[in-house]
Image: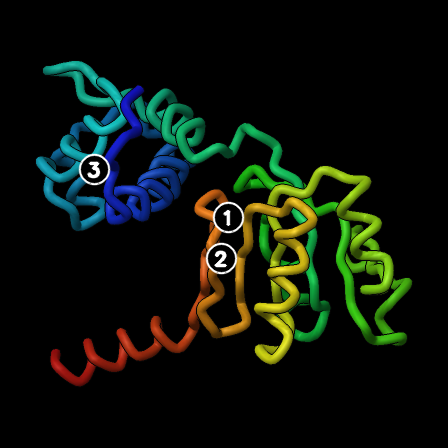
Amino acid sequence: MRKENISDAVIRRLPRYYRQLTDLCARGVVRISSHSLGQEMNITASQIRQDFSCFGEFGQQGYGYNVEELRSEIGHILGVDNDHHLVMIGVGNLGRALLQNFKFSQAGFTVDAAFDVSPSIIGSVVNGVPVYSMHVLDGYIRKNSVDVVVLTIPQSVAQDTADRLIELGVHGFWNFTNIELSSADPDVKFENIHFADSLLTLSYRIANR
């Protein structure tokens, strides 16, 4: 499997492929051509073939792709079978909504714990996830395997919190604080989520339709 020099655009399309193939499996589709998959996703067949070629050979000429096998392969590339361990920091409205509604397990993540500063939240359990005090965060990280931290905390403490966690060995952050977090360590990865970007993209499209 070739992974070198893969563009960010290709990586960001992989979850779309995985989601579409999951839907096709649920609809009972057994095989599909790159042309038909492209029509489903509004992507050209040549783009699909080019994207898949970054990771190896998929499908057979004249047959197309076995949907379940392709879904499994892309899931493996995305790491959904790695059982990543995740904790959340910040169990306010957004954090609670994510814990209650987002299907972390379908993306290959186990949510082990959450942390907050509010006495009214500490000690509670949200959708099976215990909420601990921030005072015990460092000790928890040292004792447990944590692959990703979800940040739903105020912007004013976001970078300092990330820096603190990086020093403790955390390398992955799903950041909902609406600011760009960064690290000088190239092994530390951030996925900075900006809801306004998506809404402004929609604004542009409806303004220029």
Tag nearer the camera, 3 or 1? 1
Q: Secondary structure at mark 2?
A: loop
Rendering coords of residue 146 (x, y %): 68, 43
Tag nearer the camera, 3 or 2? 2
Whichever of labels 3 and 1 marks the residue nearer the N terminus, that label is: 3
Disc 1 + disc 2, Cβ < 8 Å: yes
| Residue sitting at x 25%, y 37% | 6
| Residue sitting at x 42%, y 25% | 72
Rendering coords of residue 121 (x, y %): 84, 71
Question: In the rendered image of this protein, does residue 73 appear above or below residue 183?
Answer: above
Rendering coords of residue 126 (x, y %): 78, 59
* Occupied quadrant, residue 76: top left
| Residue sitting at x 53%, y 41% | 107
Q: Secondary structure at mark 3?
A: helix
Label 3 to label 2, Cα distance in Å?
38 Å
Label 1 to label 2, Cα distance in Å?
7 Å
Q: Which residue is mark 3?
A: 37
Please, what is the three-letter code of the amino acid marked with disc 3?
Answer: Leu
Please, what is the three-letter code of the amino acid marked with disc 2?
Answer: Ser
Q: Which residue is mark 1?
A: 188
What is the quadrant of the C terminus in the image? bottom left
Label 3 to label 1, Cα distance in Å?
34 Å
Whichever of labels 3 and 2 marks the residue nearer the N terminus, that label is: 3
Question: In the rendered image of this protein, does residue 3 appear above or below residue 147?
Answer: above
Q: Which residue is mark 2?
A: 183
Question: In the rendered image of this protein, does residue 106 appear above or below residue 76?
Answer: below
In the picture, measured across the screen, residue 166 lies left or right of residue 5, that is right
